[in-house]
Amino acid sequence: QSAVTYHSLPCPSIHTLYTHNVQATVIVDNMSANTVNPDHCLFAVPKKGRLFEKVTAMLKGAGVEYHREPRLDIAICKDLPMTMVFLPASDISKYVGKGNVDIGVTGIDIVEENCSEVERVMDLGFGACRLCVQAPVTSKITDVKDLAGKRIVTSFPTLTKKFFDPIDAEKGVTTSIRFVSGSVEAACGLGLADAVVDLVETGTTMKAAGLEVVGTVLQTESILITNPDSKHKKMVDLLKHRIDGYITSKKFVMVSYNCSADILETVSQITPGKRSPTITALTDGGHAVSSLVNKKKVVQVMDDLHAAGARDILVFELSNSRM
């Protein structure tokens, strides 16, 4: 878990946002919606972008069901006392930190940039990337210290300033940091900056813009966060167990096979499982073994089992789990 102090202008309450959304929906679609149940846990979900589809799939796999009306950024869960609120990913940590919503999904980079005081419930295993200092390849800059005192464009001014402040103090200069909300990689080509600080996942966009990594500011990924003072701790714990079970089911498969008693110890070492393999004695003196295996390693494990003498090797996909 990690927590940082958040200082900013007061966030409007989620009920205010909801009222605005309903008013907009009434104007556009001539329809109305029910107000948020004050006893519900409020769960903030990225409303669009790279996280939206992955978070939606994760929630579906974890059994969180809801129906979202078109053009309405709110939805009531079918079987849980919870309301889903769809917000920009860059704002979610602010609302969670201020207690306007109880729980949310966003990136470590957003939490740190917003200086949000939140509780990090769990890492979600997707959205991994780096926040990097990037300079034009033609500049031939290899040391980030050479950018101190120059012009930097970024969507992460707080983290960028925090990164350059000790370098500036060491060199006795002040780095100019300018905020832009998008298309950061174009700043150098347009003559607006000497370097940029932006997220790098595959590096395709960076290379297309003629940039290269000079330094890393932060390693980030998607995380589940909650307000430390939320009154819905039981719901937070339930969601954590459900999501953790779903993530496990996507990482592992169940491998089942038969083996003779004389190779049982050998094959058990090939498939140790998360805790230990499940072993059942057969009427012919052999054993049936089943074990969880990391999905990325399953093909090699099957080869190793077969070479060791195991037979009837089967692989089963998992739809969900509880560990």
Image (cartoon, rainbow, N blue to C red):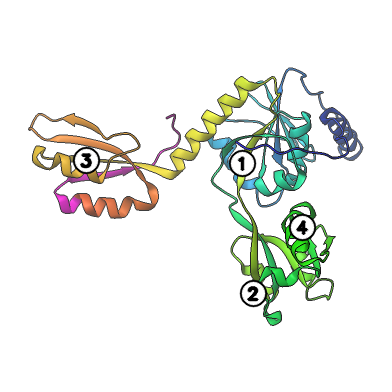
Residue at label 4? 165
Q: Nearer the viewer, mark 2 or mark 1?
A: 2
Badge 3 crowding class, 10 Å Cα cut-off, few under 14, some 14 to 19, many 20 or more, is: some
Badge 4 crowding class, 10 Å Cα cut-off, few under 14, some 14 to 19, many 20 or more, is: some
Amino acid on which disc 1 is placed: Ile
Mark-to-mark CA distance, 3 and 4: 54 Å
Badge 1 crowding class, 10 Å Cα cut-off, few under 14, some 14 to 19, many 20 or more, is: many
Residue at label 2? 142
Q: Which residues are magenta?
A: 306-323
User: Which quadrant holds residue 122?
Assistant: top right
> Would residue 235 be visible to someone looking at this image?
yes
| Quarter of the rendering occupied by the C terminus | top left
Please tell me how many numbered marks the rendered image carries. 4
Name the residue rendered at 73%, 58% in the picture: 166
Q: Position of residue 321 (x, y in %)?
A: 44, 32
Q: Position of residue 138 (x, y in %)?
A: 69, 82
If you read the primary sequence from the N terminus, does the residue marked by circle 3 or circle 4 appear first? 4
Amino acid on which disc 2 is placed: Thr
Q: Give the vertical position of 162 relative to 195 (above or below).
A: above
> Would residue 79 be visible to someone looking at this image?
no
Secondary structure under tag 2 reads loop
Residue at label 1? 223
User: Which quadrant holds residue 293?
Assistant: top left
Amino acid on which disc 3 is placed: Ser
Mark-to-mark CA distance, 4 and 2: 19 Å
Task: Report if the CB atoms under discs 1 and 4 are less than 8 Å apart.
Answer: no
Task: Report if the CB atoms under discs 4 and 2 are less than 8 Å apart.
Answer: no
Secondary structure under tag 3 reads helix
